[in-house]
Amino acid sequence: MRAPRAAFAALASALAFAFALASCERARGGEGSASRPAPTAPTAPREAVELALVRVEPAPLARFLRVTGTFHGEEETTVAAKVSGRIEALAADLGDVVRPGQLLARIESRDQELALRERERALEQVLAPLGLKELPGEGFSIDALPAVERVRLQEENARARHERGKTLHERVPPALSDQEYADLQTAWEVARADLRAAGLAAETQLATARAIRAQVESAAQRV
């Protein structure tokens, strides 16, 4: 029984020595406490953070592609002016919605109006020698023109004189010499030639008048 008692005594001595040593250390710590840093104050507790939990599931994801380009309409119309000139009014601009037949722009018409008047005066100048104020329609006979009618009357007079002269020249004895009868015959032939020439001249003037009238209509359309 001696051995356990000796061990217990040795353990008690060691514990006593340890307590004594700790007391000395505390005493020393009290003396040098001025040089040691002060313990930090405990921090305040942080606020609680709420977390939302969701279930992760596979799903289709839309993808967008950013590109640069130009839009073109399904139908395109070329808009152009038939005449040249200065734009004096613009009724529609690029990107506006317009209706069929709507005015888009107006071109200054002063030059076109002057051209129209010029063509109208030229038409009057061609019709004046024919004794007309306006161009006749279809089925018109050139014999009704004053210039042609005058020549036609001269041709009828020459033909009547030739017929009377022929009757006198065929009498026995002749009441009209051969030279006088030849003169009457020549005069009638000249009158017939003049009538044909007058008809051709009238046709030419009418054709010119029709051409100028087409120019008048074109100028009116440009106005």
Image: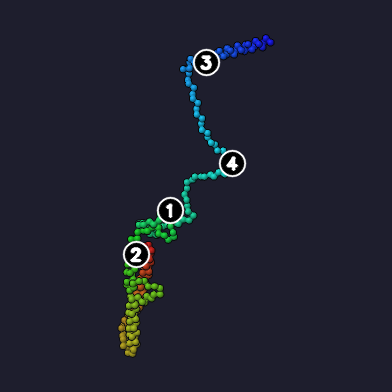
Name the mark on residue 95: 1
Work out whether mark 1 precedes mark 4 in sequence or the reverse, and give the earlier one: 4
**Dot 2 corresponds to which residue?**
116
- Asked whether residue 186 appears in the rendered view, the answer is no
- Asked whether residue 102 appears in the rendered view, the answer is yes
* Measured Cα–Cα span from mark 3 to mark 1: 94 Å
**Dot 4 corresponds to which residue?**
57
Name the mark on residue 26: 3
**Secondary element at tag 4:** loop
Which of 130 and 163 lies nearest the eye of the viewer?
A: 130
Task: Identify the image quadrant of the N terminus.
Answer: top right
Q: Say whether marks 1 and 2 touch (CB < 8 Å).
A: no
Residue 115 horizontal side relative to residue 13, left or right:
left
Where residue 100 appears, as percent x and y from the top left, is 44, 60
Quarter where residue 187 is shown:
bottom left
Work out whether mark 1 precedes mark 2 in sequence or the reverse, and give the earlier one: 1
**Amino acid identity at mark 1:** Gly
